[in-house]
Amino acid sequence: MVNRVQGSPMNRQSSSYFPTFENIWHSQKWPKISGSARIICRLLIVSALLAAGTWLVYSTGGTGYAYPYVILVPVLLSAVWFGSSGAVLSSVMGGLLLGPLMPLDVSTSTYQSTENWLARTAFFLLIGVFSTGLFQSLRLANKRHMQALEIDQKTGLRTQAALSRDLERLLRRVRPGNTPSSAILLLRMQDLWEILQSMGAETAEQVVKNLANRISQNIKISHQVYRFSKSELAILFYVASQEDVDSQKEVSSVFEIAQRIGEEETTVNGIPLRVQIVAGSYLIRENDQNKEIVLNRARTGLSVAIENNVPYRRYDPMFDQKTAERVQLIARVRDGLENQEFQLFYQPKICLKTGQHVGSEALLRWFNHEKKMVMPGLFMPKVESTTLIDPVTRFVIARACDNIRSQNLMPVSVNFAINNLMNLSLIDDLGRMVSSYGANPESLEIEITEGALIRDPTQAKAAVRRLRDQGFKVSLDDFGTGYSSFQYLTNLPLSGLKIDRAFVIDLETSADARTIMESMISMAKALKLEVTVEGIETEEQRKIVTELGADVAQGFHYSRPLALHEYQKWVKDRSQRL
């Protein structure tokens, strides 16, 4: 990729330790007028104002009236545009124009004394020089203010404010045609928060500074690195290719450099550290005029990458449509709860030793106002990360308890999101809620995820203990897919664990898969936990997990999730067969 900077090469010895775009994106009030033409225009304006002021004084009767001081307007403009020399020259010119040849009173042809116009000229000079000093002080104060806004004091990196300014200038200079001209890459340091918590803010800031410095040193094209937020960097750079495909490759290559640098160890205070990088990008085009839209599109790419658990995504217009649809969908969740659009479906659980039906898992289903089912994957991940998860979970518990009492259901398990487990109000209300529906805590099992254990192990343990003290069973859901260790399991007062379906898929064909399954079941048994295996789809899988010692199974081999009336019919038919 070629360097596209015109003029002098990028200066790596600038005030920042990064290359700058100042040679490209310098401040211009009139971007299409050259420097010399701008000076000429300003001189003409000052001259015109001096002439206009002189004419106004003469036409209104002479210097004996109030209008002589309009000459201060070009004097002040000269102080702003040309500094002290311009202010002095303009003051002298104004003093002479209103001096010996300008009458004191035009109607009587009375001329002013020499002392009079010299004193006026001296006054103009004083105002001009004073104004020059004042404007220079204002410029310096503004420069210091802009530096404080645009330079991160802890890392020396340019800030989001500087990025906004540079983007605004860049968008005025994109080349004609709807072809890529520049690109922005937004990087997030995923594990910086852990470094901050464990090693302190100073170490985290040093990690950010080192990472940005090393990324900048390894990118060989014109670019600028910015501190976009506490855990995010932005890279603004030119692309050389005219075609979309080649331009996207250039952007990907910049990300690969950043990713590689993040994976390399950096030593801070004698401790080797590395950072996981996730990024989103956007190619800037000729029709892009709004800097906020450019930033939002790069942010959208980053959000999609994080959501899909991949390291990098470039912006696609389809992302906006999907995001808008999802936002609208989430906004309708509360209305859906009020309008009774949500239902519970039940997937049966089977005792592997006896083959008897022993309970079910309650799964939330949403049928919108058109009676069409909204797939859980479209709304539940977002709901779980917002405060909406509280009313949704309370609805699930209330409906499950009502069905347990009114339909005499066997024990039902419900899922708790991370935010549910961190919500002490919900934990403390649970026993009262269940009792208010005439159900017993023993009839409701709470399934928690491994993510809650990682987020706050201490609070998760306290929450599980409160649930157990109220009489609820608590099991660990999707076991094996997260980060749970044997130490976590021994410290938590769990009643069971559920092995994820990912460990079931290869049981019939892989000895390694059977060995892993046997190890997990044995570990759970050693801890006196009831073992449930989900995702059983064949008779052979059922036989294998039974032989390995699992207690309970659920999956399509027995039944898909069923609406309440279908579930009751399934239970009745199965009891008749057995």
Image (cartoon, grey):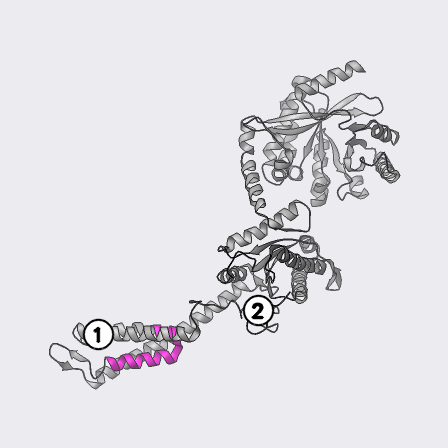
Can you name the residue that lies furthest to the top here? 576
Secondary structure under tag 2 reads loop
**Quarter containing the C terminus:** top right
Name the residue: 72% across, 33% down: 447
Residue shown at the point (56%, 37%) measured from the top left: 330
Instruction: Name the spot of residue 495 as percent of width and height, x first.
Output: 77, 32
| Residue at the spot of label 2 | 5
Q: Amino acid at mark 2?
A: Val
Foreground: 309 or 319? 319
Residue extent of the magenta highlight:
77-99
Crowd class of label 2 (few under 14; some 14 to 19; many from 20; radius 10 Å): some
- How far from the left and from the top, in percent, is residue 277? 68, 55
Q: Tell me which amino acid carries mark 1.
A: Trp
Location of residue 547 with respect to 320 vertically, above or below:
above
Which mark lies nearer to you, 2 or 1? 2
User: Residue 170 at what x, y percent from top left?
Assistant: 51, 62
- Dominant SS of magenta comes to helix
> Is residue 336 at all visible to an observer of this figure?
yes
Q: Quick check: 510 above or below 208? A: above
Residue 470 drawn in magenta: no
Q: Quickly name the residue at label 1.
A: 55
10 Å neighbourhood of mark 1: few (<14), some, or many (≥20)?
A: some
State the residue in front, 257 or 129.
257
The percent coordinates of residue 392 (x first, y second) are 60, 32
How far apart are labels 2 and 1 at the CA level? 49 Å
